[in-house]
Image: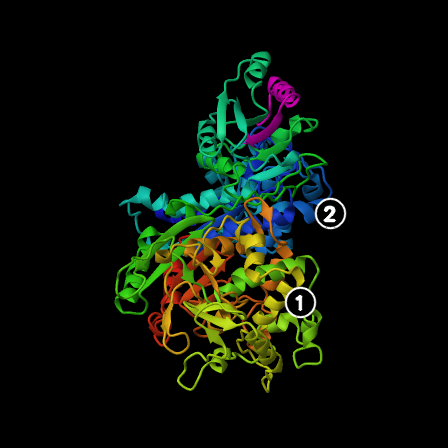
C-alpha cells in the first residue's frame, strides 16, 4: 500500500484503523477493524504502519479513543461510549498506546461522547481533556493530531460552542478535516490567536509539526508524479499475490462435521448461490475440482425438488463489497431455505461477507460444514473454491466472536490434500524470468563435464514450478535423461527411507530421542556404543567412526574380489547380489557387524559425519518387524504415497534404459553400476542399506519432502505427528558448532556449506555422494530436488561440488521468489 501511495503522490494515509470491533451492531466500523482482540488489532495495525513508514509515507491511527464498541454512526449522530475509564484504558486505548510507542505519524480523533474521559457530553474531537491531557500528556504523543471530518453530524450538530473549527484547534488538534465553513473557521482562529497570546504558541506548535511532516515525506524538494506506466506500477504481480495470500491465510473453517471438507472427486455435488451479489467465479473455480451442478434458486419447494438427486449441497452466500457497513444479514427466507435443505441434505455453507452474518442463525446444527470467506471479491471466490477442494490448507481464525460456541479465535485447521500439481508461476510467487537462469547454470554443469546429466524439480506452495531434465545418462550421449528416469540417491536414503520409519517408531513411543543404542540393539550392551543416544548419533555428534571400507576386506592384492567371498553365480551361501554376475557370501554380513561393533570412537567429541548408525537402525527395524528395510519403507510410505519409482534394487522393476548408471567401478566390482547401488557398504548388504541404496526420480523425492513440509500429513493421511517432525527437525547441538538436526542436514552456521546461505533456519534436507540434493524450506513453502550422476564414469570427478552447482541453483531459486 505504501509503495502504491508513493507512486500516486499520496504522502499520508489515514490508516490504520485501530478500533476494536466488539459490537456486532456497529454500523460504521465493521470489517474496517482488524477484530475484537486488542492485541490482534495492535499487531496488525503495527504491520500496516511499518509498511507505510518503510515506503516513506505518513500514517494516522484512528479513531481515537476507539469507535469499535458503538451502535451508532458518527457521520449521522454523536455515538456514546458509556464505559468507565479503566475499561477504556485497558481495552480501547491499547492499540493506540502500542503504535504511539512505535512512532506512528499521527492520530485521528473521533467524534464520540465518552463521559468517562471528557466529564461532559462534549465530542472527544473537541475535548481538551481528550486531545491534550490524555493523548498528548498522558500517552506522550507528539506527532500530528487530526480531527475526523468536522462536517460529520457527530461534531457539526454540537451547537453549544461558538465555532467547531476553533474548538477543535483549542482542544489541541493540528489538522482540521473538512470544515463546514473554511473561511469562517480561519477567521475565528485568527481572531482567537490575536486576542490570546497563549494560542499563538499553540499555533506555532502545530505549524512546526505540519512542516516537519511535510519535510519527512520530501515536500521540501517537491517532484511531480511520474505518470509513465503508472497503472502497471500500482498493479504489480506482487500486489496480486499478496492479496491472494491474505485470503488464503484468512478464510476460516468453523464446522466440519462428518469430514465433509475437503471435497472429494467421487461425490456429486449441487451448488446453490444465494444473496444479492454475483457468485459465478466461485462456481466456475469449484467445478474445475469436483463433480458440480448449479441449481437455480426458485422458491423453497421447487429448489428442494431440484436438489433431490444430490446428497451434498454447497450453498454460497454473496453480499456486495461496495461498503464495509452495508448489511451482511441473511433474509428470513434465506434462513428458512437453508434450514429446509439441511433437513434432507448434507450442507456446506460458505459465506462471502463478514462473519457477523452467521449470528442470524440461532444455531448451526442443520449445517455440517461452515466456511467464512469474508469478502465477495474475485480473489476470495477463487481461493475459497480451491480451499474447499483441498488444494490449499484452511488455517484462518475468526477475528470476532459470533456466539459462545464460536468466539474470537475460532477456526479449524485443515491441511490440504497436498498434491504437488503443476501451477502457473504467478500463483506460486516466483519470477519466471529469473527462474530461467537455472537452465543456463544446469547447462554449464553439463557442458563442463561436471555430470553427464541431471534432473531438477522445484515446487512452491504445493505447486510444481520447475521440472526439467538435462544431458544424458553417460558422456556417450546415447540415452537422454527424462523426468521419469531414476537415479541412485546415495545418502538421501537416510532421510527418505530410514528416518521416516524412525519417526513412526517415535510416534508409537517405541523409542525416544534420549533412548540408548543398547536399548534398541542388545548386541551393543557392554560396548563403546551402548550408551550413545539416538539424538546424538543421528545428529552425528557421538564420536562414531566416520566410515568403514568393508569392501576392502573382500579384495585380493590386485583389488579384485576374493573367491573366498564371491561367486559369479548364485550358489549355496553366495546369494547376495553386489553387481552384475557377482554374489557375496552371506556370512560376510556377520564380519561387517563385528567391524561396526568393534569400531573405535573418536578421541574427542565434535561434529563428524558417520554412516554407521544407519547400519544399526536398519538392523533394529528389520529385527523388530521381521521384514527387510526395502519392504518396510515401501509398505509404510512409498505405496501409500503413490510412489511408483522410488525403490531399492530397481533392476527387473524399472526398465534398464530408464535407470541412470552411477559409475564404472574399477576398484571393487569392475563393472558399470546400473541399477546396483554405488555405495560399497550398501552393495555388500544386497543393495538395501539404511544409509544408501534407494533409487528414485526428482519428482517422487519431492513428494516425500512435501510429506515432511506438511509435518507428516499427505493427501488425507497422517503418517506421523507434527510434533514428531518438529523434534527431529531441531538443531540440538548448534551451540557446539554442529548444525545437524536429528537425521536431517540443516543450514550451515557460518560461511559456505550445505546450502546457499539464503534459506531459513527451519529448512532441512540432505546431500548425496552421487551428486544428489533435496531441501525443503517451511518459511518459503519451497522444495528443491537436484539429482545427478556426477560420479560417472568415476567418483574422482568432484567438479559439481567444487563449483557449488547445487547450492548456486538454490540461490537462483531464492532470488526468483517475489513474495
Dot 1 or dot 2: first in sequence order is 2
Label 2: element kind: helix
Measured in 3D between alpha carbons, the distance from the residue under mark 1 to the one under mark 2, in whole angstroms, is 50 Å
Q: Which residues are magenta?
A: 325-352
- Residue in the foreground of this view, choosing between 275 and 647: 647
- Residue in the foreground of this view, choosing between 80 and 232: 232
Q: Is residue 336 magenta?
A: yes
Q: Residue at x 61, y 77 (%)?
A: 542
Rendering coords of residue 218 (x, y %): 37, 55
Label total for image: 2
Rendering coords of residue 682 (x, y %): 50, 70
Q: Residue 513 got which mark?
A: 1
Residue, disc 2: 86
Q: Residue at x 35, y 47 (%)?
A: 7
Q: Residue at x 68, y 46 (%)?
A: 91
- Residue in the foreground of this view, choosing between 613 and 438: 613
Q: Is residue 13 above or below residue 500?
A: above
Q: Nearer the viewer, mark 1 or mark 2?
A: 1
Rendering coords of residue 649 (x, y %): 47, 61
Badge 2, how many Cα within 10 Å: few under 14, some, many 20+? few
Apparent side of residue 87 relative to residue 422 in the rendered image (left or right): right
Amino acid at each position: 500500500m505504501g509503495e502504491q501511495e508513493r507512486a500516486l503522490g499520496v504522502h499520508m494515509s489515514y490508516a490504520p484503523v485501530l478500533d476494536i470491533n466488539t459490537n456486532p451492531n456497529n454500523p460504521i466500523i465493521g470489517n474496517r477493524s482488524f477484530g475484537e482482540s486488542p492485541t490482534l488489532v495492535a499487531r496488525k495495525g503495527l504491520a500496516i504502519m511499518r509498511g507505510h513508514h518503510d515506503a516513506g509515507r505518513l500514517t494516522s491511527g484512528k479513531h481515537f479513543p476507539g469507535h469499535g464498541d458503538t451502535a451508532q454512526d458518527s457521520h449521522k449522530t454523536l455515538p456514546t461510549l458509556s464505559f468507565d475509564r479503566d475499561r477504556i484504558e485497558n481495552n480501547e486505548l491499547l492499540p493506540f498506546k502500542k503504535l504511539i510507542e512505535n512512532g506512528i505519524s499521527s492520530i485521528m480523533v473521533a467524534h464520540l461522547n465518552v463521559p468517562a474521559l471528557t466529564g461532559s457530553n462534549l465530542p472527544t474531537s473537541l475535548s481538551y481533556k481528550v486531545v491534550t491531557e490524555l493523548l498528548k500528556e498522558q500517552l506522550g504523543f507528539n506527532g500530528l493530531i487530526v480531527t475526523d471530518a468536522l462536517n460529520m453530524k457527530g461534531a457539526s450538530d454540537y451547537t453549544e460552542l461558538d465555532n467547531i473549527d476553533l474548538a477543535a484547534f483549542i482542544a489541541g488538534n493540528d489538522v482540521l478535516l473538512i470544515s463546514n465553513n473554511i473561511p469562517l473557521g480561519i477567521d475565528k482562529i485568527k481572531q482567537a490567536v490575536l486576542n490570546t497570546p497563549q494560542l499563538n504558541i499553540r499555533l506555532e506548535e502545530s505549524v512546526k509539526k505540519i512542516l516537519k511532516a511535510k519535510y519527512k515525506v520530501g515536500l521540501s524538494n517537491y517532484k511531480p508524479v511520474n505518470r509513465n506506466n503508472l497503472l502497471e506500477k500500482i498493479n504489480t504481480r506482487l500486489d496480486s499475490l499478496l492479496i491472494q495470500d491474505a485470503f488464503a491465510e484468512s478464510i476460516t473453517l468453523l464446522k466440519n462435521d462428518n469430514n465433509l471438507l475437503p471435497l472429494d472427486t467421487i461425490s456429486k455435488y449441487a451448488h446453490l448461490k444465494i444473496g444479492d451479489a454475483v457468485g459465478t467465479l466461485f462456481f466456475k473455480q469449484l467445478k474445475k475440482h469436483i463433480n458440480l451442478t448449479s441449481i437455480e434458486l426458485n422458491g423453497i419447494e421447487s429448489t428442494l425438488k431440484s436438489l433431490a438427486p444430490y446428497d451434498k449441497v454447497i450453498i454460497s452466500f454473496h453480499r456486495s463489497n461496495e461498503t464495509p457497513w452495508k448489511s451482511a444479514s441473511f433474509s428470513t427466507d434465506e434462513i428458512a431455505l437453508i434450514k429446509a435443505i439441511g433437513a434432507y441434505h448434507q450442507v456446506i455453507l460458505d459465506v462471502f461477507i463478514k462473519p457477523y452474518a452467521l449470528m442470524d442463525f440461532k444455531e448451526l446444527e442443520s449445517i455440517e460444514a461452515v466456511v467464512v470467506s469474508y469478502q465477495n471479491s474475485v480473489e476470495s471466490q477463487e481461493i475459497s473454491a480451491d480451499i474447499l477442494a483441498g488444494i490449499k490448507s484452511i488455517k484462518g481464525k475468526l477475528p470476532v466472536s459470533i456466539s459462545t460456541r464460536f468466539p474470537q479465535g475460532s477456526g479449524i485447521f485443515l491441511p490440504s490434500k497436498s498434491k504437488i500439481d503443476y501451477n502457473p508461476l504467478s500463483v506460486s510467487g516466483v519470477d519466471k524470468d529469473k527462474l530461467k537462469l537455472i537452465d543456463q547454470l544446469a547447462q554449464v554443469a553439463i557442458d563442463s563435464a561436471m555430470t553427464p546429466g541431471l534432473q531438477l524439480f522445484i515446487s512452491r506452495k504445493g505447486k510444481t514450478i520447475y521440472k526439467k531434465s538435462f544431458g544424458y545418462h553417460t558422456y556417450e550421449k546415447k540415452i537422454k535423461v527424462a523426468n521419469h528416469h531414476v537415479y541412485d540417491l546415495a545418502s538421501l536414503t537416510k532421510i527418505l527411507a530410514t528416518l521416516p520409519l524412525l519417526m513412526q517408531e517415535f510416534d508409537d513411543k517405541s523409542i525416544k530421542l534420549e533412548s540408548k543404542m543398547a536399548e534398541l540393539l542388545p548386541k551393543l550392551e557392554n560396548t563403546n556404543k551402548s550408551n550413545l543416544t539416538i539424538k546424538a548419533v543421528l545428529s552425528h555428534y557421538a564420536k562414531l567412526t566416520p566410515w568403514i571400507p568393508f569392501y576392502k576386506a573382500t579384495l585380493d592384492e590386485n583389488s579384485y574380489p576374493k573367491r573366498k567371498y564371491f561367486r559369479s553365480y548364485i550358489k549355496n551361501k553366495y546369494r547376495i547380489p553386489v553387481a552384475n554376475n557377482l554374489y557375496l557370501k552371506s556370512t560376510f554380513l556377520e564380519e561387517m557387524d563385528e567391524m561396526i561393533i568393534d569400531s573405535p570412537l573418536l578421541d574427542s567429541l565434535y561434529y563428524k559425519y558417520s554412516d554407521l548408525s544407519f547400519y544399526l537402525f536398519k538392523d533394529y527395524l528389520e529385527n523388530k518387524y521381521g521384514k527387510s528395510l526395502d519392504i518396510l519403507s515401501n509398505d509404510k510410505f512409498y505405496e501409500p504415497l503413490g510412489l511408483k519409482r522410488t525403490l531399492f534394487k530397481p533392476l527387473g522393476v524399472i526398465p534398464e534404459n530408464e535407470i541412470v548408471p552411477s559409475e564404472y567401478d574399477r576398484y571393487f566390482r569392475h563393472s558399470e553400476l546400473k541399477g546396483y547401488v554405488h555405495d560399497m557398504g550398501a552393495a555388500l548388504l544386497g543393495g538395501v542399506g539404511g544409509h544408501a541404496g534407494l533409487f528414485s526420480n526428482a519428482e517422487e523425492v519431492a513428494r516425500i519432502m512435501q510429506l515432511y513440509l506438511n509435518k507428516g500429513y499427505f493427501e488425507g493421511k497422517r503418517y506421523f505427528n507434527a510434533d514428531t517432525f518438529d523434534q527431529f527437525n531441531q538443531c540440538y547441538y548448534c551451540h557446539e558448532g554442529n548444525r545437524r538436526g536429528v537425521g536431517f542436514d540443516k543450514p550451515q552456521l557460518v560461511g559456505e556449506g550445505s546450502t546457499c546461505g539464503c534459506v531459513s533456519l527451519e529448512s532441512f534436507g540432505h546431500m548425496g555422494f552421487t551428486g544428489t540434493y533435496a531441501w525443503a524450506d517451511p518459511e518459503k513453502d519451497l522444495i528443491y530436488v537436484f539429482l545427478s550422476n556426477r560420479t560417472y564414469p568415476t567418483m574422482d570427478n568432484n567438479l559439481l561440488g567444487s563449483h557449488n552447482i547445487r547450492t548456486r541453483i538454490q540461490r537462483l531459486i531464492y532470488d526468483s521468489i517475489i513474495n
